[in-house]
Amino acid sequence: MSFPTYPGYKDSGVEWLGNVPEHWVLTPIKHLALLNPRKSDFAGDTEQLCSFVPMEKLKTGVVQLDEERPIEEVIGGYTYFEDGDVLQAKVTPCFENKNVAIAQGLTNGIGFGSSEINVLRPYQGVNAEYLYYRVQEDSYMSFCTSSMIGAGGLKRVPTDVINNFKIAAPKLGEQAQIARFLDHETARIDALIEEQQRLIELLKEKRQAVISQAVTKGLDPTVPMKDSGVEWLGEVPAHWEVIRSKFVFGLVSGYAFKSEFFQKNGDGEKVLITPGSFDELGRLYFSEKSTVQYEGEWQDQFELKVGDLVMVLTDLSYKKLILGRAAFVERDDALLNQRIAKVIITPRVKAKYLWLGINSEVMREQLKLTASGATVFHTSPEKVGDCWMALPPCEEQLEITAFVEEFHLKLDTLIQQVRDTVGLLGERRSALISAAVTGKIDVRGWQPPASTQAPKLEEVAEAV
């Protein structure tokens, strides 16, 4: 879809703006909105309730309002805002993720939240929805990001950078029309992104279902079956062995490395495999390296080599279920941390088949029953050893592994294609916002077209 341009433009004299519509006015953001209103301006009853918004509850276009607190409890140390204010994260990476939204539906019209939230209160003659989109524009985001101060994950956008950032803005009526246009167009794009993300989840579920089916039923639907006697296994091929895990593989727990063992920029860099290193597809990833400062023969058992299979014995939280994830090590500079175990593979099982078996829902469900803990679930090698497995002959293990690997390859390719589509849609969303709020396109005559029905992506997943 193409949009018209304005009939006349002028040179803004501002590098990041370039040419702007002739009738738009150049102004710094501080002339459009008050940044971070003073809490002393609040003259209401401090005993009444207000909405409370931690940083994690501010997302793009959404403020999650499920917490309330008395104003007197939060007025001292938190950011103050009201209905109609634009909220924007000021700290990395939330700022770059465009965690910005309009506060609406606050309890008693009042809210307090994280001190890492900036508040923009539009002045009279400024449309809040337009301002919400304006602070998502690409050149504004890039300039503010490059101007951040602080160290590491605590970098913040200075308030003077926001206040003095120059933009070109139309009158109120045109602002409202731009916001109306972007509301409609971004909603369409967001709906497409959500559908694509749903498709990714469906494909992941399909992947897990294929693994579980393969390691409990095999590949031949005509083979005679028997009752395994284990709830989580159900019926299994009659010629398969139903066996405790401890007779198939062993586990060596990792070491609780202390912080004093590490320094930055030293010799002999090593990486720690932690529970957070495992992705949901059974692979390892690492964010940074640390240098290990220890010596002694005992270190050998915690050093890993390429091809080692490792397994998570804990969950980071009740919401992020990673207990039982297993992955192969693909580098020779990794160390085995606590809550992680190295899998010792016996001759009766093939390594890749065991990787499938551990990552299956059948094993995960059993492991959940073995886990305990008040805030963090964890299990032990002994408890893992008591879990049941269905074990086919080694030749059949190889056949199952080959089948699943081929299926995974096809599925991974499809998942990556969908992720690429999500990325392109996100770029389209950003480009459309930037074009509209900087006057590169003229939407004054725009009217919403007839709606269209979104495709049913479940059918795509079922076809795989």
Image (tube, rainbow, N blue to C red):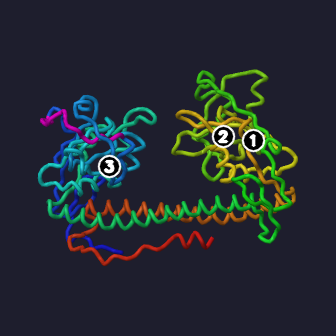
Q: How many angstroms separate mark 1 from mark 3 (CA)?
A: 45 Å
The residue segment tinted magenta is 41-54
Q: Residue at x 76, y 21 (%)?
A: 296
Q: Quadrant of residue 46?
A: top left
Q: Give the residue number, with chain letter if any, for mark 2.
A: 370
Query: Residue at point 23% right, 61% down?
Result: 20
> Residue 265: x percent and y percent?
59, 29
Q: Earlier in the sequence, mark 1 or mark 2?
A: 2
Discs 1, 2 touching: Cβ within 8 Å:
yes
Residue 377 x/y as whole percent? 58, 37
- At label 3, the amino acid type is Val
Q: Earlier in the sequence, mark 2 or mark 3?
A: 3
Tally of numbered discs: 3
Q: Secondary structure at mark 2?
A: helix
Residue 301 is one of the magenta-drawn residues? no
Task: Classify mark 3: residues with Cα within 10 Å, few (<14), some (14-19) or many (20+).
Answer: many
Query: Quadrant where the C terminus lies?
Result: bottom right
Give 401 or 428, whichever is nearer the viewer: 401
Where residue 416 appears, x then y in whole percent?
58, 62
Instruction: Reply above or below: 107 against 253.
Output: below
The answer for how far apart the CA atoms under marks 1 and 2 are is 9 Å
Quick check: 329 left or right of 172? right
Query: Label for residue 49?
Result: none
Relative placement, left or right, of 317 versus 366 is left
Instruction: In this rendered view, identify the residue nearer to me: 284 or 4.
Output: 284
Residue type at the position of mark 2: Thr
Which residue does the numbered mark 3 point to in the structure image?
63
SS at badge 1: loop
Residue at (22%, 34%) from the top-left corner?
A: 71
At label 1, the amino acid type is Asp
Q: Do callouts 2 and 3 mark residues in contact (Cβ within 8 Å)? A: no
Disc 1 designates what residue?
A: 386
